[in-house]
Amino acid sequence: MNHEFPFNNIKKIDIRGKKLLIPTMHPFGSHLLAACCRGFGIDAYPLPTYIDLNLGKQYTSGKECFPCQVTISDILYFLKKEEQKFKDNFNANNYVYLLPEADGPCRFGMYNKFQRIILNTFDNFKDVQISYFTTEDSYSTKGILPEDKASDFKKIGFLLMVVSDIFDRIQWRVRPYEKIQGSTDELIKNMLNEIIKVLEKKAEKLPFDEIYEILELTTIKAKNLINTKISRKPRIGIVGEIYLRTHQPSNQYIIKKIEQYGGEVVNASLCEWINFVTYENIRKTKLFLRVLVKENLYKYVFATMKKLMSLKIEQEYQRFIMKKAYSKVLKHLDIQPDHDVEELEKHLENNHIYSYEVGTEACLSIAGALCYMKEGFNGVVNVYPFSCMPSTITSAILRPIFKKFHFPYLDAPFDGTIQPNREIAIKTFMFQASQHKKLLKN
């Protein structure tokens, strides 16, 4: 009998020489991250996604949230195809599956463990290794890449997440007003490929300037696609669980559906979460430092202060990159700027609504939704997996507040099924948003 602990194959390993499999969550971010890896000499590919959801449903009970079913479906589908392709030459040890994790109460933190157990039930997939980024060390790449490359990879990796967010915001700002239908999506696709080419050739050289140039050129071209005769439409803010609100097949392309019924959408960003993780680690480190001083454990103080300084430098780097990237766009096109997580906390604390001490994505969703209302948006949609705890908390807090202010709000839970009333709910919500816009105008 094999008594090996099932999670031994979940660890940070050197991914050079392996085929790195990246879950496709964001339509741009996953492809940019894979291209960046290839530029660093890593054979990396985003997984085909949402092709055979039944694969995941066979190995889940429904108690897991929907992203678990989607991601396990994607990895099983890919590995089965590879097995068919290579037959007797298939070697599971050649593959590393990158599945990030988070601490706290969210079930997502356990999914790489759960999926390890599932992969172990297949004789041919037991040797597929799972590696991860984690919130505990602010998504550090140490242990995955050599130490002399890990820092540079993280630097450019963060820029690529910012670029992904900005491409999103350009697309959402322009698409509802485009002169020729489909022109915005085509432009973004072409410019994304331009960045991918740069990354594959020069990622290790940190080609920030070239990426900024492509970003600015994209903005200029996108602005020319706008039909200025079309009046500004009701603006809709989206909050919720990061995977569901980002992964378009899982949320049944809700952004395009809102646009179809006359809305202009802004979704919460990828970087909002990354910035929140850094901010939370700073808060926790400060608290730990106070405990050390109170308990006279001074021998640990220096190391903790060093960690705190490193986190603060990282926070300032993130702010610097975001400011520079957004400035390239905002001088040409009025996309929605990103929310600062520190300001979001102040908004919650000043209004005694919720506390960052409780944690989870609810912190960002509640504060972000309230900021949308304050910024003149005309409605908010909360997108999340069915039974998601943080998003259920978000709904419970936001509903009475928005009802008081007569502000349109819609909960949009997803579990892979087609809900016959979804279309009616969105259509009704958009009617309310258009009425809200008229009231604000008057």
Image (cartoon, helix red, strand yellow):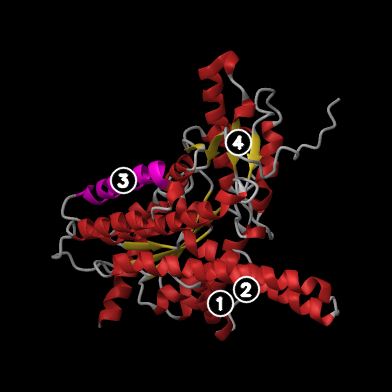
Q: Which residue is mark 3?
A: 194
Quarter holding the C terminus is: bottom left
Looking at the rendered image, the disc whose residue lies closer to the viewer, 3 or 1, is 3
Dots 1, 2 in contact, CB < 8 A: yes
Residue 114 in sight from this viewpoint: yes
| Mark linked to residue 345 | 1
Figure label count: 4
**Label located before the other in sequence (4 or 1):** 4
Q: Is residue 68 above or below residue 92?
A: below
Q: Earlier in the sequence, mark 2 or mark 4?
A: 4
First in sequence: mark 1 or mark 2? Answer: 1
Marks 4,3: beta carbons within 8 A = no
**Residue 151 spot, x, y in % from top left:** 56, 55
> Which residue is identified by label 4?
96
The residues tagged by marks 3 and 2 sit, at their Cα atoms, a distance apart of 39 Å
Q: Judge from the rendering whether residue 237 lies leftward or rightward of residue 365; answer left or right.
A: left
Tags 4 and 1 in contact by the CB under 8 Å rule?
A: no
